[in-house]
Amino acid sequence: MNATERVEVRGHIVDSLILAKVLDIILEAGGDYRIVEFDVGRTSTDPSRAIIEVEAPDAATLDAIVDELAVHGANRAHQHDASTAAAEVDGVLPEGFYSTTNLPTQVRLNGRWVDVENPEMDCALVLRPDGRVRTEPMHRVKAGDPVVVGREGVRAQPLSRPRGANPFEFMASEVSSEKPKDLLVAQVADRLRAAKATGGKVLAVCGPAVVHTGASPHVARLVRNGWVDVLFAGNGFATHDIESHVLGTSLGVALSGQAPAEGGHANHLRVINEVRRAGSIAAAVESGWLTAGTMYECVTHGVPFVLGGSLRDDGPLPDVYTDVVEAADAMRALLPGVTVALMLASTLHAIATGNLLPAGVETYCVDINQAVVTKLADRGSHQALGIVTDVGLFLHTLADHLLPASPDG
Amino acid sequence: MAEGALTWGRRLLMCPPEHFGVLYEINPWMHQEVAVDLDRARAQWDQLVAALTAAGAEVEVMGAQPGLPDLVFTANAGLVNGRRFVPSRFRHPQRQGEVPHFRAWFEAHGYDVVELPEGVSHEGAGDALPFGRAILSGYRFRSDAAAHTALSDLLAVPVRPIELADPRYYHLDLTFCPLDGRRALVAPEAWDTYGRRVVEALVPEPFALQPEETAAFCANSVVVGTNVVMPTCPPRVGRQLEAWGFAVAEVDVGEFQKAGGACRCLTLALDVDLP
């Protein structure tokens, strides 16, 4: 269904080509326009004023257009405070609720624009009694909570896309399969150093291929040396990581030599069984049964992790959140302070994490499959930069860049 | 004096670099690890004052303030037209503390100080330069397009917004330098296509800088009548300026370039009086 919104642009908009630019921006973004009012200044010093009705095929496109127009001085024609409606039932949003983006957002209350806390896409905006506005997922809204409805009085700020300053600019938002990899890895290493230097946290999201490609020891090195502050993964990654360090195989295949181990197909079940016997991964470390690997390093170095479950999980490991809503909440709780996210050969967890991240978090998606990166961007994580390469080689090189003199590689 | 020489630029406000330094990074030129040599900065600033005075300008000096390293860049104080002064609204909190000092100076010197509305950023003469009867004003990195209507109302002049497209040239005065009524140094690659067309339509005789000339801050020059005080003058630029009848004085302001500013950024014209 088409969505429309009126914007007003004032000033010397004709000679300065601002009007032409505004109209071009609307058309280029797939929208259409109708000039509803147009007062042309009578002399060269008189300002002109135009009210333009912007039409777009859907609300998201319209929002994107209106946000971009604001950069060029064209604002919503009537600016009012945001409206709210009380949620009637726990976990159910009122009719017409404002659905959030992951962009920095402001809500107009009593004539002032208030920054929304913790931007996250596909959530609601809830007013707090102290005047703050929080982004809340649907399930956390309580009956009686004032929830922002409609788009009046809400504005999302498009991330500025500086041209040229960012060393990654030459590959901005595009999947790079034909770029010199070592240069990219060196630049990711630089971004991690910059993040850590300013007190930012690094999040790693790991898929099972990290272990299959033999890269688990490199993630473990990064964790051990303080380069990873938060880890998200699924049952698969944790299981294979533990299996590879306890039994030397990953899904039954020996990591040294790549030969299937005798009876190896059940190795991962044996591992899960042992951890379940211990009660948790931490208990398995405590007992001396698990002595190396990424999960071991997380436990011994106090790096928090969330293992999100799925229907396909064997076991699963006792640490796995089998309730997906609880898993997402546990992930949310660890996101404040994260400024860089590394998505490492993980499709489902990368997208799930992308859904929770504010648009301002630098996100590098490393996968041998170009489709994963595209998928992430298609779901709204437009800030994700893709590096198409073998995750094993990537992590080995990254760890060497960050820990060049490390004797324990 | 050349016909159509600039009617402004003979009275300038400057602030000595007593507390100057690169203490934060709010543009791509700034790197905190690059140390500023304060003695050299002071010597360069004195040489700039001497060159401007020799060119025929009168320099007014305001006091430096501890904790405000960028106060030296007086171009960003605000905008003057006649006896009216519109103080800047800085985008970055690091520079917002400069506003009361600039405002106090202008109030003490009898200017009518009028404020931009809240909620919009504009960084004064750093982003807005008169040409002919209009003001060209850059936006995106430091100034908001939404400020232009208010500026036009407050100063009673037409304002032509130019979108800046390269974060290295975060202020218009790094990309545009009016020379007289017909001529200007311009850096079209730093603007979007609409901005280029606006400048083409407005400036009868532009001299387009090469990218390396722009990066050398050639456009960040101060024009006093037929004298151009520049941070550097590549031969190609110098030949054209001389052919147009300008005399060029080069002043090394390398210490200030570490913070992303050169000659123009260190001065604010107090005698702008647009018809």
Image (spheres, coloured by chain):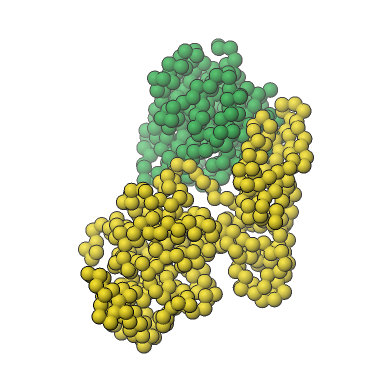
Chain colours: A yellow, B green
The picture places residue A147, in percent across and down from the top left corner, at 68, 66
Q: Residue at x 57, y 37 (%)?
A: B163
Whether residue B104 is visible here, answered yes or no, is no
Q: Residue at x 43, y 16 (%)?
A: B239
Between residues B111 and A218, which one lies in front from this camera angle? A218
Quick check: B132 left or right of A268?
A: right
Q: Would you place residue A209 above or below residue B95 in this image?
A: below
Q: Residue at x 43, y 30 (%)?
A: B211
Q: Quadrant location of the C terminus of chain A? A: bottom left
Quick check: B82 left or right of A340?
A: right
The picture places residue B79, in percent across and down from the top left corner, at 61, 33
Quick check: A136 left or right of A241?
A: right
Res B1 quadrant in image: top right
Res B122 quadrant in image: top right
Res B125 quadrant in image: top right
Between residues A88 and A317, which one lies in front from this camera angle? A317
Whether residue B130 is visible here, answered yes or no, is yes
Quick check: A81 left or right of A229?
A: right
Marks counted in the figure total: 0
Between residues B22 and B5, which one lies in front from this camera angle? B5
Q: Would you place residue B29 above or below residue A342 in this image?
A: above
Task: Spot the residue most to the bottom.
Answer: A277
The picture places residue B252, in percent across and down from the top left corner, at 39, 27
Q: Residue at x 70, y 40 (%)?
A: A9
Q: Quadrant location of the N terminus of chain A? A: bottom right
The picture places residue A65, in percent across and down from the top left corner, at 63, 48
Between residues A292 and B171, which one lies in front from this camera angle? A292
